Image (tube, rainbow, N blue to C red):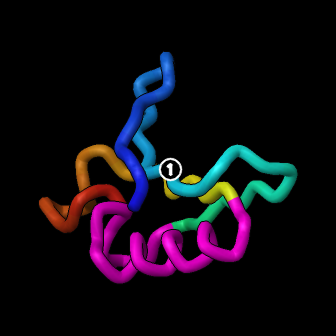
């Protein structure tokens, strides 16, 4: 439902929902910001009227792990 984007600083994130007065910052679990479960949770909050941002916090992933938990 959402989109991948980057800030001018280079921080990548997944954003979903309409711009609203209800922003929500969702921090991914150990499987990363690109995981289906994390995005599904973000999408569900977006359906409730929130604008959700899931930032990619680890670049590269710890010990060659997942996509930026």
Q: Is residue 44 left or right of residue 14?
A: right
Residue pictured at 66% horizontal, 59% vertical: 25
| Pointer 1 local density, CA inside 10 Å: few below 14, some 14–19, many at least 20 | many
Q: In this view, does 33 lie above or below 60?
A: below
What residue is pinned by disc 1? 15
Q: Can residue 68 be seen in this view?
A: yes
Q: Is residue 53 left or right of residue 6?
A: right
Residue 17 position, x and y percent, is 59, 56
> Front-most of 37 and 31?
37
The segment highlighted magenta reads: 28-50
Q: In this view, does 48 lie above or below 26?
A: below
> Front-most of 58 and 45?
45
Identity of the residue furthest to the left in this view: 64
Q: In this view, does 11 lie to the left or right of 21?
A: left
Secondary structure of residue under mark 1: strand
Q: Is-magenta flag for residue 36?
A: yes
Q: To which quarter of the image does residue 61 belong?
A: bottom left
Residue pictured at 37% horizontal, 51% vertical: 58
């Amino acid at each position: 439902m959402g989109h991948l984007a980057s800030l001018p600083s280079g921080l990548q994130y997944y954003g979903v929902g309409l711009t609203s007065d209800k922003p929500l910052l969702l921090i991914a679990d150990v499987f990363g910001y690109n995981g289906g479960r994390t995005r599904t949770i973000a999408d569900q909050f977006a359906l409730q009227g929130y604008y959700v941002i899931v930032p990619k916090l680890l670049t590269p992933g710890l010990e060659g792990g997942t996509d930026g938990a």
